[in-house]
Amino acid sequence: MKKALITGITGQDGAYLAEHLLGLGYEVHGIKRRASLFNTDRIDHLYTDLHQDAARFILHYGDLTDSSNIIRLIAEIQPDEIYNLGAMSHVQVSFSEPEYAANVDAMGLLRILEAVRLAGLSQKTRIYQASTSEMYGMVQQIPQTEKTPFYPRSPYGVAKLYAYWIAVNYREAYNMFISNGILFNHESPLRGETFVTRKITRAAAHMALGLDKTLWLGNLNAKRDWGHAKDYVKAMHLMLQQDQADDFVVATNRTTTVRHFAIMAFQRLGVELRFEGQNEQETGIVVSSSNPDFVFTPEQIVIRIDPKYYRPTEVDLLIGDYAKAKEKLGWEPQVSLETLVEEMVDADLELVKRTLTLKNQGLKFYIPQQQ
Ligand code: NAP
Ligand code: GDD
């Protein structure tokens, strides 16, 4: 039985990857941070009682900023594969917490690589690094490939670029098996609520059932190449099954504006939207609403701009060419953007309905504000 260690197991990708690896028969170890509340919602369904002999899903407390903890865990677990998904992954937040982003996203991988060497596992343990299309930043080529020069536009992107290059350097210097997955944006119903796709689907569902009135967004013109997280974690695993370590773009080769993503999300709720105005005055307005269960009315303004969501430096356009992953890994995206949007809106609608049921039963409930 192969043993995998996943950092960031409580995140979106960690949850999908853990499920995928357990399905393949792996023993899966995950590092979770200590939090004052439970932070394992996304993986609770995978939990098995550790007192059972056959438990194959094991969580350990840890943090990528704590070398001693990383060294001890890797020496104890002796994993065949490490997937380094842990990160301060929010681009806008990285402008507020640049030093922390560098500590986790750049130095975190270095700590793992040194821990693997110290444990004498350089030739045994294969390592996946969660690199990102954010490294292309101000894109130098369209579409972006493994050969496109990088030009990061955020502290997050710069930190991830360090991790990318330290992965390449340790691969060449010590002949270690380390692969960079350069993944373009990937989403799902498990996506964090402050990333733009989930923010839109969640707010649209709240509005449909009368729990919110306005969705405040930033740059509607940004274009992203959005895929489904459950497709992308399969590519991570495939990268570590190759004869040689390498770097791969994982994308859909289709790009869409934030504005159009919003149009698609509202469409799923039977709402046709039109946009009027320029820049900060732009609004998204209901043209028509076909579902009588939802409370939208014609001419209702459902989207407005709040400049606080603008970034000091923006990544305007991402679109990835995944030809190398297709050729060498046999990987292709399976889920279309249309299906992804439907899945996310439907899941958020279910969540809102459950919240309303609790409210109607007189139970205490709380709707976190948009961020
Ligand atoms: P996510 O949902 O934000 O999950 C991040 C994970 O990292 C969470 O489990 C988080 O723990 C953990 N983490 C944060 N700080 C940590 C620390 N100091 N020590 C240990 N763990 C820490 O991100 P994701 O979307 O799953 O992305 C997974 C990885 O892929 C990240 O490295 C991200 O930068 C990268 N990536 C993502 C995308 C994308 O579109 N999703 C694209 C390219 C690359 P808590 O749950 O406790 O916060
Ligand atoms: N979050 C957010 N909130 N983004 C907004 C908003 C808003 O209210 N309004 C417009 N946007 C725009 C952002 O300016 C950006 O251009 C785009 O929507 C996507 O933003 P995010 O969903 O926050 O994702 P990201 O592209 O910045 O970063 C994600 O993808 C990277 C891969 O390219 C993250 O998952 C990163 O961790 C990942 O590396």
Image (tube, grey):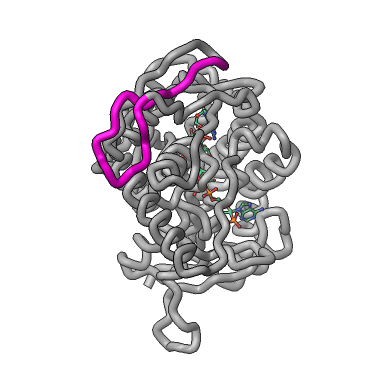
Which residue does the image show at 39% across and 57% down from the upper left?
353
Against 296, residue 224 (above or below) is above
Q: Quadrant of residue 202?
A: top left
Q: Quadrant of the N terminus?
A: bottom left
Residues 363 and 167: in front is 363
Residue 157 seen by the camera: yes
On whether residue 281 falls in the magenta region, the answer is yes
Which residue does the image show at 46% across and 61% down from the upper left?
42
The picture places residue 305, in percent across and down from the top left corner, at 55, 24
The picture places residue 241, in percent across and down from the top left corner, at 35, 53
Q: Which residues are magenta?
A: 280-298
Which residue does the image show at 53% across and 22% down from the upper left?
219
Instruction: Spot the residue most to the top.
Output: 278
On whether residue 135 falls in the magenta region, the answer is no
Residues 293 and 255: in front is 293
The picture places residue 246, in percent across and down from the top left corner, at 42, 40
Against 169, residue 125 (above or below) is below
Which residue does the image show at 60% across and 28% down from the upper left?
309
Q: Quadrant of residue 252?
A: top left
Q: How many numbered tags mark residues here?
A: 0
**21 left or right, relative to 79:** left
Against 305, residue 113 (above or below) is below
The picture places residue 113, in percent across and down from the top left corner, at 61, 52
Residues 128 and 259: in front is 259
Q: Quadrant of residue 274?
A: top left
Q: Quadrant of the C terminus?
A: top right
